Image: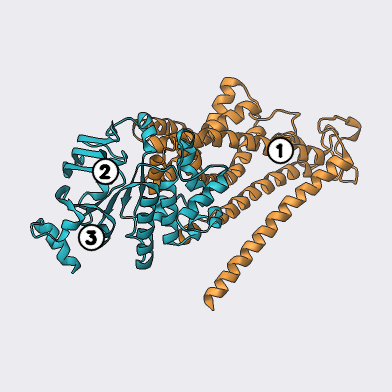
Chain colours: A orange, B cyan
């Protein structure tokens, strides 16, 4: 009985999680459709006659100090913040995973050199790297992304390496060698499928952190530059109007919270889906 | 003319312990040579050395006139097609993330183009996999399953199918039945014996099971602590002048 109960509650919880995830995906989709099909504003269009307007049907979230439609800017911000976050993440994965694969599979000197390099990168906090790069190369979203990639690839390299280390001693890798499979193909065909699940989980959890980083550094002026509709930059621009028009700061703030939460939920969901325990049972 | 010639092979671990000492034997074409010994005596190490997974310290391993020992992986690869293996634990020998068909196709994808197959014909992946599965008496629809959906005996048949897929000259069978239940053991042994006849294969059959080795092989070797202490033809197993250790093994089976 107890076991049956435990199973049903855990599957209930899973159902709720899935439902919450779906809602969170549908909600912004609906907003995007409304903004792009019905409103059709230019996110950078300055209209000083319409500045700081309150909420209305034409401007569902009002307008900012330059008369730009806030909802439109928020949704374009999706493309900016989430889009840049995804680009940085993808670059980190594309750089990190092959390095980790190589280090784990080759072992020996290759492994030691690659992992010491990784350690060196890991020893810098990401915010510091971003600030230093902004100082050296100038503030801007490209340099911010570069800073994120420089810091983040290490965790993917480590993840790939640790998975390879546990797998490479197994018989099926030895059989692949006996069967004449080339090293590169052993990595892509035999080892990569073992890594991809873990990478997806880590990446979806990382996405939230990266978005926070992009927003916070844009907020202090080191990332996206105005008039880019990036959420952190919008927060910064809205600061002087906080007392009269608090919604100008609250709405991009909520967007950040929403997306970071979504990324964490997605990460949890994927972790459950790629559950390691399940594989052991089977 | 012998197919595989092993001469004076010695191997010592880094710790200084000798695992293989002066191993000598030959395997002829279409012959099955059995190797008996207790676990830990060096049988599997010998198998890995023959398969060039581990290097040897001294001696030579010659396959069909070509020395194979301690070659670089790159120059070795073309010869891997002639020497294949079936290992003890089929669950470990199949990648759990790959479908059966993808594991099965590994050798052919590497060597298929240089190989004239006599018994199998490649038209497409699906058809080739069906022929291989049929050869090991498995239904063709298993091709699209994952390893965990198969029984131990079925998995071992899959690894056998993979080993024969490029019609190698010799297959190293390292305890191929010891992780299976008694019924599967008998049927897998029968299958292996039949395939040897049908495809003209040679085997090195490694096992701790004296009876199985006696049933499968024409020639037998007994190994103890890294040394081959006794070599004889199958019929001479019960001869009076057998090595004391061999007689000890026989008495354990009676």
Residue B77 vs B219, above or below: the answer is above
Q: Chain of mark 2?
A: B
The Cα atoms of the two marked residues, 3 and 2, are separated by 21 Å
Q: Is residue A260 visible?
A: yes
Foreground of the two, B76 or A145: B76
Which residue is found at the position 72% from the left and 37% from the top?
A79
Nearest to N terminus: mark 3 or mark 2: 2
Q: Chain of mark 3?
A: B
Q: Position of residue B191 (x, y in %)?
A: 39, 57
Q: Is residue B78 left or right of residue B63?
A: right
The Cα atoms of the two marked residues, 1 and 2, are separated by 76 Å
Which residue position holds label 1? A231
Which disc number belongs to residue B162? Answer: none
Which disc number belongs to residue B28? Answer: 2
Q: Is residue B49 left or right of residue B134?
A: left
Labels 3 and 1 positioned on one and the same chain: no
Q: Position of residue A148 (x, y in %)?
A: 57, 33
The image quadrant that residue A227 belongs to is: top right
Which residue is found at the position 23% from the left and 60% from the top?
B210
Q: Position of residue A20 (x, y in %)?
A: 69, 57
Q: Nearer the viewer, mark 3 or mark 1?
A: 3
How many marks do you count on the picture? 3
Which residue position holds label 3? B210
Foreground of the two, B31 or A75: B31
Which residue is found at the position 73% from the left and 28% from the top?
A226
Q: Is residue A155 visible?
A: no
Q: Nearer the viewer, mark 1 or mark 2?
A: 2
């Amino acid at each position: 009985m107890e076991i049956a109960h435990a199973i049903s509650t855990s599957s209930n919880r899973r159902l709720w999680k899935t439902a919450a995830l779906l809602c969170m995906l549908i909600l912004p989709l609906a907003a995007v459709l409304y903004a792009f099909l019905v409103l059709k504003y230019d996110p950078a269009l300055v209209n000083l006659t319409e500045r700081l307007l309150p909420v209305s049907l034409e401007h569902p979230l009002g307008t900012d100090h330059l008369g730009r439609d806030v909802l439109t800017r928020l949704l374009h911000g999706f493309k900016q913040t989430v889009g840049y976050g995804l680009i940085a993440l993808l670059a980190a994965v594309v750089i990190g995973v092959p390095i980790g694969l190589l280090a784990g599979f080759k072992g020996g000197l290759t492994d030691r050199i690659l992992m010491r390099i990784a350690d060196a990168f890991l020893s810098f906090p990401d915010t510091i790297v971003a600030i230093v790069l902004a100082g050296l190369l100038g503030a801007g979203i490209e340099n911010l992304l570069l800073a994120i990639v420089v810091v983040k690839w290490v965790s993917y390299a480590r993840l790939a390496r640790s998975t390879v280390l546990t797998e490479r001693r197994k018989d099926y890798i030895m059989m692949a060698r006996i069967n004449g499979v080339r090293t590169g193909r052993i990595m892509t065909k035999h080892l990569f499928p073992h890594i991809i699940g873990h990478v997806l989980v880590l990446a979806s959890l990382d996405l939230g952190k990266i978005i926070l980083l992009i927003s916070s550094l844009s907020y202090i002026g080191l990332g996206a530059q105005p008039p880019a509709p990036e959420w952190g930059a919008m927060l910064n621009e809205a600061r002087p109007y906080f007392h009269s028009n608090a919604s100008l700061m609250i709405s991009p703030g909520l967007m950040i919270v929403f997306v970071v939460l979504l990324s964490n939920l997605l990460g949890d969901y994927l972790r459950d889906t790629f559950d390691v325990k399940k594989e052991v049972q089977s | 003319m012998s197919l595989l010639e092993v001469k004076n092979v010695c191997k010592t671990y880094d710790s200084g312990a000798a695992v293989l000492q002066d191993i000598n034997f030959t395997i002829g074409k279409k012959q099955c040579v059995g190797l008996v010994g207790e676990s830990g005596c060096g049988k599997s190490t010998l198998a890995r050395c023959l398969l060039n997974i581990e290097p040897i310290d001294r001696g030579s391993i010659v396959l069909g006139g070509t020395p194979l020992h301690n070659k670089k992986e790159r120059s070795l690869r073309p010869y891997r097609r002639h020497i294949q293996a079936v290992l003890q634990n089929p669950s470990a020998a199949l990648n759990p993330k790959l479908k059966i068909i993808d594991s099965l196709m590994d050798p052919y994808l590497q060597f298929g183009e240089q190989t004239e197959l006599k018994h199998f014909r490649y038209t497409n992946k699906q058809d080739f996999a069906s022929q291989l599965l049929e050869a090991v008496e498995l239904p063709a629809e298993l091709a699209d399953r994952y390893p965990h959906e198969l029984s131990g005996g079925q998995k071992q048949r899959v690894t056998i199918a993979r080993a024969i897929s490029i019609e190698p000259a010799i297959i190293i069978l390292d305890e191929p039945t010891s992780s299976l239940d008694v019924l599967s053991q008998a049927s897998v042994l029968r299958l292996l014996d039949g395939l040897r006849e049908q495809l003209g294969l040679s085997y090195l059959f490694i096992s701790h099971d004296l009876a199985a080795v006696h049933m499968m092989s024409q020639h037998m070797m007994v190994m103890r602590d890294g040394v081959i202490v006794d070599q004889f033809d199958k019929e001479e197993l019960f001869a009076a002048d057998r090595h004391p250790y061999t007689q000890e093994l026989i008495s354990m089976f009676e």
